[in-house]
Amino acid sequence: MVSNGQRLRIEALVGQTGPIQQTYVFGAIPDQKRRNAVRAFAKGIRTGETPVLLFDNTVFQSAKHGFLLTDRMLYTRNIAERPTSVRVEDIRTITYRTAALGEEFTVNARGQAITIQATFADNNKQGRRLFELLRDAVEILNESPHSSDDDAASATGVEAPTPVATAQNTAPGPCPQCGAPGQRLRCEYCDALLA
């Protein structure tokens, strides 16, 4: 379950990055797109899972390829590939690279690597922003929803989920991409997210 604080932080990320083509968050996910994604690649979705982020990577906007991030799972399907999924709590890193036909995100989880393809008509700025949104949303979902959860975890001996490893975990500071000093949310030189 997504806490109100987590929801607000993820929605704030969308406000910081600006709109991203073919991308929908929480209640803004159209019902038909959500249903199509569930039928095409998120068949394992369980009652009570909260859809957080949907990326529709189809030409005709059917949402039968792309990814659906819920509070528990990341479901994906690339064109001409089988659907894959990974538990959010198992995700360790997400990396970005420009590929021949768009952008690719590699999701590294315990013993598993999943590649997500993202294609945008305009340029790779949309892809980079989508990567940052996905990476940061996963990090937020992997944090304890309440600050007291860490205390409760240590008292019960249950280990809290490990946050996604990113250079932005300890900011503001120098830009992780270009090394320029940064005191704002984005680097003034290369526009990388600092915190």
Image (cartoon, grey):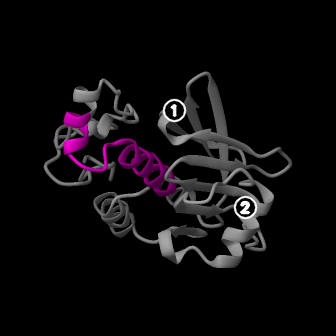
Q: Position of residue 111 (x, y in %)?
A: 61, 21
Q: Tell me which label, 1 or 2, sits earlier in the chain.
A: 2
User: Which class describes the residues within 10 Å of circle 1: few (<14), some (14-19), or many (20+)?
Assistant: many
Circle 1 SS class? helix
Q: Which mark is residue 90?
A: 1
- Tell whether position 37 is magenta: no
Kindly identify the amino acid type of the residue bearing the numbered disc 1. Asp
Give the residues drawn in magenta, as a range.
Answer: 129-152
CA distance for labels 1 and 2: 21 Å
> Is any atom of residue 139 visible in this view?
yes
Circle 2 SS class? helix
- Tell whether position 139 is magenta: yes
> Is any atom of residue 102 visible in this view?
no
Q: Position of residue 118 (x, y in %)?
A: 65, 53
Q: Is residue 112 above or below residue 177?
A: above
- Residue 6 placement, left or right of 24: left
Q: Nearer the viewer, residue 168 or 142?
A: 142
Kindly identify the amino acid type of the residue bearing the numbered disc 2. Val
- Residue 135 placement, left or right of 49: left
Q: Position of residue 105 (x, y in %)?
A: 58, 42
Q: Nearer the viewer, residue 2 or 19?
A: 2
Q: Is residue 51 above or below residue 95?
A: below
Mark 2 lies on residue: 38
